[in-house]
Amino acid sequence: MPTFEFWNDADSPVHPASAPDYLPRPQLRELQLHRLQVTVARAYERVPLFQQRLIARGVRPPQIRTLEDIALLPFSVKSDLRETYPFGLFASPMSDIVRLHASSGTTGKPIVVAYTAHDLDVWTSVIVRSLAAAGVRRGDILQNCYGYGLFTGGLGLHAGAEAMGATVIPISGGNTDRQIMVMKDFGVTVVCSTPSYFLHLVDEARQQGVDLHALKLRIGVFGAEPWTEGMRQRIQGLADIRAQDIYGLSEIIGPGVACECQCQSGPHIFEDHFYPEIIDPDTGQVLPDGATGELVLTTLSKEAMPMIRYRTRDISRLVATPCACGRTIRRLERITARSDDMLIIRGVNVYPSQIETALLSVEGVLPHYQIVLTREADLDQIEVQVEVTSANFSDEVKSLEALQKRIAGAIERITNIHARVRLVEPNTLKRSEGKAKRIVDQRKMG
Ligand SMILES: [Zn+2]
């Protein structure tokens, strides 16, 4: 029983910041509609690109009378941010903007995103709600391995973790030896990173003779790259933790758009700030709850850079069935694929996550792999390089060949393509300190 003197809201099993997670749907929808109307009016008045597009469609802000009217509005896409670089989509004067972040684009200029003080407060609140949902509590010691700096991951998560009362270690990415030392010596209970970087830490710890099962670590909050349920099971087994999925993107706010509760049944979207839609990526048609398509997000409270119907390229579906945790906000089905990542191999569509699922279903396979695409005699060839346990690797040739066949069979069952499988020793494939590079495409175009 907490006493009056030591009472703290953050110790409640339901964190007070999580209250909007449990709003009755009709009231949530009223709030969403009000915020949508304000956001559309603001963007129309202050962002020329948005105003031009609305005028071109013959639409004016007062026409948004219901949430369904959002379908009248134009989509926005990543190239809009590049083409208006650096500040063209800002809806606040620079005097009201207190923070800029940028993502390193793979081509050309980065995209720049902005926050007012109010936007930072919202960001902090959705991270508190994310961490609370994931099971993090006041008193947890949280090692934040997301990159600090222009990337939204590090600083975004940082403020919310402090606000919820966790002890934050702002270690950022890299320097794996130091990460393991800190994890052990500081009694870290929560790690935040990409799933692939955490696997790297697991490997290094093992090599240094550090038994992760003996540490205090209990929760991993993993995001910034797609990962599968199979990968979750592997990580939980390797490190004796609960591995929770957090989702976000810089264009919308950064991490904290959605996060899994302890039921681990897909991330709950903080719908009072981010309005989700699923569309058919080819026609742009809005699809009903439960249908799979591209996730589109509209910010409902962003001041500095409102995003209207932003096409995320992430493939998912909205789950409206009640969650055992009691939250009323909808869930996303775990995002395991981005439409940008889709590979077309000999005319067949394949996602890297399907290959990951196939690999991790085979015993003896380690969760480290790379997909290499080549073209020979005008035919696409796919080779999957995967690490297997040293016990397996030292086996005789016959059993290695059998393992290879089992893996190829699993890939073929899930993807309908025949892949070459190359087994490699543990620690052969290059490890990533941020987002994993799963695909090497050596096909010459044309
Ligand atoms: Zn839940």
Image: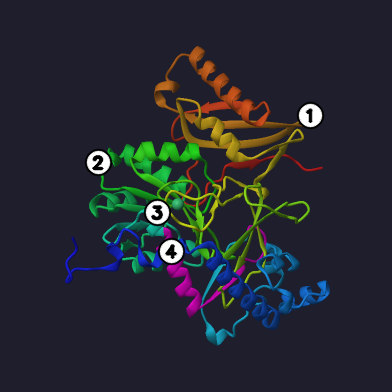
Q: Secondary structure at mark 2?
A: helix
Is 4 above or below relative to 393? below
Quarter placement of the C terminus: top right
Distance from mark 1 CB to nearest ligand 1 atom below 8 Å:
no
Side of 429 relative to 415 (left or right): left
Can you tell which of label 4 and label 2 is closer to the viewer?
4
* Viewer-nearest residue: 395 or 88: 88
Q: Earlier in the sequence, mark 2 or mark 1?
A: 2
* Three-letter code for the amino acid on which mark 4 is drawn: Ile
Which residue is located at x 47 percent, y 67 percent?
149
Is 438 above or below relative to 48? above
Can you tell which of label 1 and label 3 is closer to the viewer?
3
Residue 252 horizontal/vertical position (percent): 58, 65
* Viewer-nearest residue: 177 or 75: 75
Can you tell which of label 2 and label 3 is closer to the viewer?
3
- Report the residue marked by disc 1: 377
Which residue is located at x 34 percent, y 67 percent?
162
Query: What's the mark number on residue 214?
Result: 2
Side of 243 relative to 356 (left or right): left
* Viewer-nearest residue: 160 or 374: 160
- Report the residue marked by disc 4: 127
